């Protein structure tokens, strides 16, 4: 369907599905589609008078950690800092939070930076939510939790919020499991695609459907009619299914502006792997120059993997 200007009027994934959820919660719970609570806060970058004003018209991630001067949190803030520039390029702001005071955050950040070999800069504010008001409003701490607790901890939460201040995605992790920052960047990218286009991203996107030459492709929404699909997404591929139903309609990443190996890939991890390989090469070369009695027998090379079978005509297997 097209309007007078020839532009597509079919609904994006966000318009189609997020409108099913109310903007305002009826029981103070915070759920997908709700406008997130506004708040004021003290941070490591000075006060935020209104979170809504601070992020005005942008995407934002609110990321909580249980406590300063703890091991997993130290690695998480460092890893998040490494993703900051990719997120900023996607017009996505970042703020993190714990119930520790701002002064504690400031002292702790020296450790965080040192643990990343002083190669990072913390460019986002860290909120000091000492009275736990933000943590409680966002459901990271139960309002019934005792205020006398000597060790108040938020869960590890991630809230991804759209330009209209609506909660688009949330992750909750316990204290003992650190988060994967690549997954968070991937989620922002997927959300932004479905905010603009009538698509949904498959499992493991953008590492999907490589075996049929459609790595990083995305699905047209079931609500897109056959005519709309032809008009707006020419060249889409319909996978054959036993049911004969045509609901697996793949569109190549480049058609919707989704990169396959872009920011969602582990850019900083790739650098770390390259460094490790270089170090290993030096070690191997050094070991090779030692007297022969020190040498252990070379392990026999692993057998070459069997080539992947060619997909049968009409096949559309997602496993690759
Ligand atoms: C941590 O970040 O390592 C952590 C924080 C709170 C409880 C347990 C672990």
Image (cartoon, grey):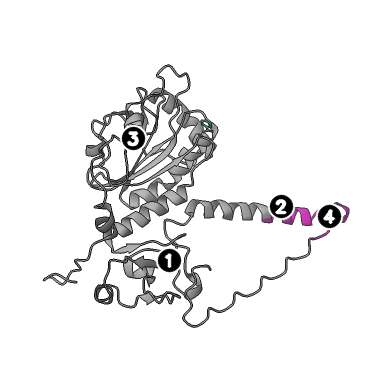
Point out which mark residue 283 bears: 2
Q: Above or below — where is 255 with respect to 124?
A: below
Q: Residue at x 42, y 56 (%)?
A: 263
Q: Residue at x 48, y 54 (%)?
A: 267
Q: Is residue 223 left or right of residue 208?
A: left
Asked if residue 297 is among those painted magenta in the image, a careful observer would answer yes
Residue range highlighted in magenta: 281-299
Check disc 1 and report its element: helix, strand or loop: loop
- Which label's residue is closer to the chain start, 1 or 3? 3
How far across and down, in percent of the image, does residue 312 sit? Answer: 52, 81
- Label 3: how many residues lie within 10 Å, few (<14), some (14-19) or many (20+)? many
Q: Quadrant of residue 35?
A: top left
Q: Is residue 30 left or right of residue 67?
A: left
Q: Nearer the viewer, residue 153 or 119?
A: 153
Residue of label 1: 216
C-alpha span from label 1 to label 3? 33 Å
Residue of label 3: 138
- Which label's residue is closer to the chain start, 2 or 1? 1
Residue of label 4: 295
C-alpha span from label 4 to label 3? 59 Å
């Amino acid at each position: 369907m097209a309007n007078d200007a020839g532009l597509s009027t079919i609904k994006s994934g966000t318009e189609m599905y997020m409108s099913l959820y109310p903007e305002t919660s009826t029981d103070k719970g915070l759920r997908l589609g709700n406008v997130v609570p506004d708040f004021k806060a003290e941070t490591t970058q000075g006060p935020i008078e209104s979170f809504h004003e601070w992020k005005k018209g942008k995407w934002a991630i609110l990321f909580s950690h249980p406590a300063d001067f703890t091991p997993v949190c130290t690695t998480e803030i460092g890893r998040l800092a490494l993703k900051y520039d990719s997120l900023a390029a996607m017009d996505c702001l970042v703020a993190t939070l714990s119930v520790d005071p701002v002064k504690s955050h400031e002292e702790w950040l020296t450790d965080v930076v040192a643990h990343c070999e002083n190669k990072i800069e913390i460019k986002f504010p860290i909120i000091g939510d000492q009275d736990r008001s933000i943590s409680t409003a966002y459901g990271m701490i139960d309002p019934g939790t005792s205020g006398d607790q000597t060790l108040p901890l938020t869960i590890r939460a991630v809230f991804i919020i759209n330009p209209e201040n609506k909660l688009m995605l949330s992750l909750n992790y316990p204290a003992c499991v650190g988060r994967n920052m690549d997954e968070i960047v991937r989620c922002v990218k997927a959300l932004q695609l479905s905010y603009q286009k009538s698509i949904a991203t498959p499992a493991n996107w953008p590492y999907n459907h490589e075996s049929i030459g459609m790595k990083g492709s995305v699905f047209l929404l079931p609500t897109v009619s056959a005519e709309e699909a032809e008009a707006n997404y020419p060249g889409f591929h319909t996978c054959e299914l036993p049911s004969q139903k045509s609901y697996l309609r793949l569109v190549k990443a480049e058609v919707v502006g989704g990169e396959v190996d872009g920011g969602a890939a582990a850019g900083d991890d790739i650098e770390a792997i390259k460094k490790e390989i270089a170090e290993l090469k030096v070690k191997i070369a050094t070991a090779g120059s030692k007297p022969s009695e020190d040498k252990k027998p070379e392990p026999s090379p692993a057998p070459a993997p069997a080539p992947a079978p060619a997909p049968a005509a009409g096949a559309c297997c997602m496993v690759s």
